Image: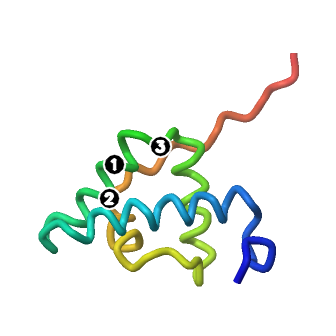
Amino acid sequence: MSPEETPHGKTETKLIYMANQIATFFKTQPANEAAQGVATHINKFWEPRMRRQLFTIIGHGDSGLSPLVLEAASLIHRPAPPEEIKPA
């Protein structure tokens, strides 16, 4: 299925791809360390907006995310919602 055929937009498709690439790398680690490795990487290198979008994707289900990413989700820091822009 091409990115254009997925139920996700281009940004979401890219985040899914990136998260799955991280999981592919950490699959080589011992099983008890792999999910923590995925979560640590995402926590260190993904900005809050990206993590927020990841949780939105996870919340919709049937995301195409690797089972290892889904396992790591409970260890990923959930960012606070963005502050609303208040009129001046």
Of 40 and 73, the residue lying toward us? 40
Q: Residue at the top extreme?
A: 88
Q: Number of callouts in the render? A: 3
For image coordinates 87% across by 23% down, the residue present is 87
The residue located at (47%, 43%) in the rendering is 46
Q: Quadrant of the N terminus?
A: bottom right
- At mark 3, the secondary structure is loop
Residue 24 numbered tag: none
Circle 3 residue:
46
On the image, the x and y values in percent for residue 20 come to: 46, 67
Is 22 displayed left or right of 29 in the figure? right
Q: Mark 3 or mark 2, which has the lower sequence index? A: 2
Q: Amino acid at mark 3?
A: Trp
Q: Residues within 10 Å of mark 2 (few under 14, many from 20)?
A: many
**Which amino acid does the dot numbered 2 rest on?**
Val
For badge 1, the amino acid type reads: His
Q: Left of 15 or right of it: where is 84?
A: right
In the rendered structure, are the residues bearing label 2 and label 1 in contact, judged by CB atoms less than 8 Å apart? yes
Q: Which mark is residue 41?
A: 1
Q: Residue at x 21, y 69 (%)?
A: 28
- Above or below 43: residue 11: below
